[in-house]
Image (cartoon, rainbow, N blue to C red):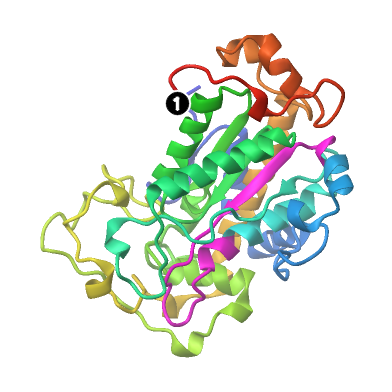
Amino acid sequence: MYDKFLTTDYPNIFFEDTAVGQMKKRIWDAGEEEVDEILQKYEIPSDSELGKAGCYIQNTPRQHCIEKRRKNDICLVPIGCTENHGLHNNSGLDTFMCTSICEAVRRYTAKLDCGEVTLAFPPLNYGGHPYHHVAMPGTVMVSEEIVKETIIYTLLGLWDDGYRKIILVNNHGMDWMLEDGIQEFFKRYQLPAFVTIVEWHRAVREFFYPIGDKRPDFVSTPFIHADEAETSVALLMFREMVDMGVVVDADPKSFGFLDDGYYDGSVDSFHRPNKWSEAEGHRVIERYATPEGVVGKPSRGEARKAKRAIACICEYLTMMVQDILKKYPAGTVPDPEKFSTRPYEEIEPCLREPLSDGWKSVHELPKRGIF
């Protein structure tokens, strides 16, 4: 099963012959009109729904949230930050990318038999950062411990409210902090749940491959930061927050070694041995290298160039939601006796409908293990 791949005209781009790979290949091969049809079913573009009643847990009457959860108890949690993305972009770009994608999936799943997926407000509007973002105006950095603990307590609160399948949809380069939060959550509480991160642009990295010279609806430069790729997504999803009249391009600067072949960019376009986040000291920090807040060529940004990537991530998240619910329908979780060292009778009251007879909050559980 591991030697079956769906190939393309580009040696670097191939897909596994699985349901996910087949979906990606379908979108890769689709004409632009077909891609537009996919976006239309997700109602893309649409205005932000952060302040629109009935779209997030926090702006919906509680009774309605409970009714939705009893049919589909998956919660999408967009993960954001406040970061300098150049003069032309908004500093909440990462947040609005994720909320826009999650909102699109919510709109579409509301039309499906699986039921409408639930959205939670972004718990992180100020995110963690790599060292090379230090001292950059417009970027608000918080500590890794704050990021980790925020994720842990967000997961805990959602779990206690009956959401036991949680997808953290991330756009910002702090995956290692989110992963730490997930692992610590399970170690600390040992509660049966399904939790995952989807760093959305890496999940659909194939559609950010720089082949714009041959396919004009693709980017022509590798995805890095506040560049052609991110600006294209912003122009598609929240055009009013972008001012292309002040756009400036900027190239990164290095200390003159390990420039080629070692470290990959934001979406691992070239399958290089090391991720961008695995080192410091080979590049000049952003404040001195690219004070423009840009690494790349955002002047080339066009909404058209982001359409396939956005269509693909929406389809991917929808597939994930449907597959999770096939395995664990609403109200069910991974078998506690195979997932946790806690005795089942200790967990069982916490698995009941919140505030029903015999229900217990996770705050009433005794501590277990070393945490």
SS under mark 1: loop
Image: 301 above or below 21 = below
**Residue 122 falls in which quadrant of the image?**
bottom right
**Residue 255 falls in which quadrant of the image?**
bottom left
**Residue 99 falls in which quadrant of the image?**
bottom right
Q: Nearer the viewer, residue 261 or 253?
A: 253
- Residue 37 relative to residue 6: left or right: right
What percent of the width, then of the height, locates residue 247?
43, 84
Crowding near pointer 1: few (<14 within 10 Å), some, many (20+)?
Answer: few
Whether residue 89 is in magenta: the answer is yes
- Outermost residue to the left: 256
Question: Which residue is depicted at the point 52% across and 46% down?
Answer: 150
Image: 345 above or below 251 = above
Asked if residue 323 shows in the view, the reply is no
Asked if residue 208 shows in the view, the reply is yes
Q: Nearer the viewer, residue 54 or 109?
A: 54
What percent of the width, then of the height, locates residue 20?
59, 38
Q: How many marks?
A: 1
Whether residue 85 is in magenta: the answer is yes
What percent of the width, then of the height, locates residue 307?
60, 63
Question: Which residue is depicted at the point 41% across and 74% down?
Answer: 138
Question: Which residue is depicted at the point 44% across and 68% down?
Answer: 83
Residue that numbered label 1 is attached to: 3
What percent of the width, then of the height, locates residue 65?
83, 46
- Residue 196 relative to residue 247: left or right: right
Q: Nearer the viewer, residue 76 or 365?
A: 365
- Residue 13 relative to residue 69: left or right: left
Amino acid at circle 1: Asp
- Outermost residue to the bottom: 245
Magenta residues (range):
69-97
